[in-house]
Each structure stands twice: as C-alpha cells, then as structure tokens.
Amino acid sequence: MSHEIKSTTPKPFIFVLMPFDKKFDDIYKYGIKGAAEKVGAYAERVDEQNFTEGILDRIYNQINKADVIVADMTGRNANVCYEVGYAHALGKIVLLLTQNIDDIPFDFKHRPHIDYEGKIDKLERDLTKKLIWAIGESSRKGKQNSLERIFVYRKGVEIPEGDTDDNIPVLTVSEESKFYLTFDIYNNSSETTPAISYISLLASPDSKLCLIEPMSAKELDEHYSDPDEFIDTYPEGIDVITSIDALTKQFRIKGTIPSMPPQAVERLFFKLGVTNCQKEGDTVLMIRLHFPNIIRDFTFKIRLLKEKSAE
C-alpha cells in the first residue's frame, strides 16, 4: 500500500481587501480564491476570520502577516484605498484589481493591476499569472529581509553593522601579541538563511595587524583551554586583496558558514598578530559576510596597549 506524503510547508497567505458588498461575493469566491487555489495559496478576507481585537487592528495585523495583498479598487472605496496605502508603506506586494481602470488612483497606476471588466473567468485567469510572480517575489524578499536579522556578537556584545556607529566596541590587546578572536553569528529571523560563502576581515592600508590562518573549533579545543588566550607562535598570514571600501586591506578567511535555521548560532574563529611597527591606538576592523546577492559588514576596534591587558 502506498502512502501519500503531504508537505508540511505552510501555504502562501493572500490577504484580500475589497468592499463589504454582496455584489463582490462571487468575484471573491470564484475569481480571487479560485486563482489562489490554482497556485497553491490560500486567500482570506477579514470578515471570514475569528478575532478578538478591533477590526482595524486585525486588518493591519493581517496586512503585516500576508505574503501578498490583493485589493479590489472598484468604486474607489475609501477604506480599501487607505489599507492599500498602508500595505505599500510596509513594502508589501499588492496586486490591484478593478472593473474600471479609472477607479485606480493615478498614484497607483504604475503598480501591478488587473482590469477584469467584471468578468470572473478573466479575473481568475489573469490573477493566477500575477500570483505566480507575486508569491515568488515575496519569497525572495522574505529571504533577503531575513538577512537583516543576522547579528554578530563578541562575548555577548553586539558588533554593529556599518562603519559610522559612535559606539563601536573596542577590544584591547598589547603590542607584539598574537591572539584569537571569536564571534557568534546569530540568526534572529524566522527564515533559514543561505550559506555564507565568503568571509573576510578588512583593515586600513597602514594597519600592521595581520590575520593568521584560523583554526577549527576542534583544533582550538585540542590545543588551547581558552580560544582567547595569547599565543606565542606566529605563522604566516594569508594573501591581501583590495576592497572598494575605505578599509582597503582585506584578508580572506578560508571556509564557509552553512545555512542557519531560525535562532541558530554559528561561531567564527580567527587569529590576529600585531607587529612592533604598529603605533599604540585604535584600529578599525570590519568583518565582511558574503551571502548570495548581499554583503553584510560588522565593525569593531582593536586598541593596542603597551602592556598586556585583559579584554
């Protein structure tokens, strides 16, 4: 006996905005919901749902939650227009419907829209095509947005993104030292992130800091009781390549970080050396994480002291 294995992946959610008027019932039931079913999604209006909050709060909540918004602009209903504006402000993908193209306000006419001329079969056919694109685009945007919730920490202290933060954390070390740094990369999103395919450390051109070949976590555990203790050995550094940023000295860190499920943490280890040519002071460094189609930069400082001091 064969058993069908059903997917547990949630269906895309399409939230529908339209006037509460019985003349739209068949348009909704057969045109919009029919198209949603064809593309493996589910569509709902707020009047189908059970909720305890106020109706406006519920509508705003569902707009936030939806993968795609479908809005029938026929008759220029004021509530629908307002809700569409709210959805656009959130960056949602909104598909506009109308039985009369003049009912779509001028400011919305450059947005994706369908003039179905009151024909339900035309609406279902045309909306099906638009939904295929919209759901795919929503998924792509969702994955990209999830990367905005990747955080980097050093011993519980967040390493900020970018290079303009006045509160960049400072790590203190002594001159002529060799030391390990460990960073935790945390996925605080609800999506599994793509793998980090390339990791680099950036410094200013005159920096005398050198990156030393990193060890794996297993090697660290075998050789050192604390990955942050000072090390006397000083192996060769790795090749320097140029960067388009002001921090033009760039060291590539070998290895990758795999896809991270929601709330997962991966640890990044690398070792730095300081030559005796480096003057005492702060050096700005940047960790660069390369995801598909996006780069994230996280900035910190190394403060060089004449005598060893604990961080």
Image (cartoon, grey):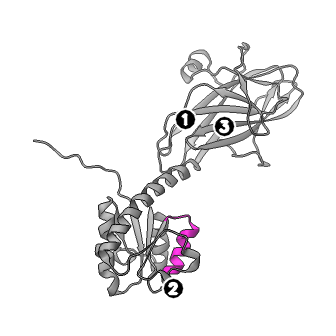
Q: Do the numbered discs 1 and 3 sit on residues whose CB atoms are within 8 Å?
A: no
- Between 189 and 310, the residue placed more toward the observer is 189
Where does the magenta region start and end?
79-93
| Residue position marked by numbered label 2 in the rendering | 78
Dominant secondary structure of the magenta stretch? helix
Amino acid on which disc 2 is placed: Ala
Amino acid on which disc 3 is placed: Arg
Sequence order check: which comes first, mark 1 or mark 3? 1
> How far is disc 2 from disc 3 in space, using C-alphas?
47 Å
SS type, badge 3: strand
User: What label sits on residue 123 in the rendered view?
Assistant: none
SS type, badge 2: helix
| Residue position marked by numbered label 3 in the rendering | 288
Q: Identify which residue is drawn at 48% across, 46% down.
A: 262
Left or right: where 183 falls relative to 136: right
The location of residue 113, given as percent across then percent down, is 46, 71
| Residue position marked by numbered label 1 in the rendering | 266
Image quadrant occupied by the C terminus: top right
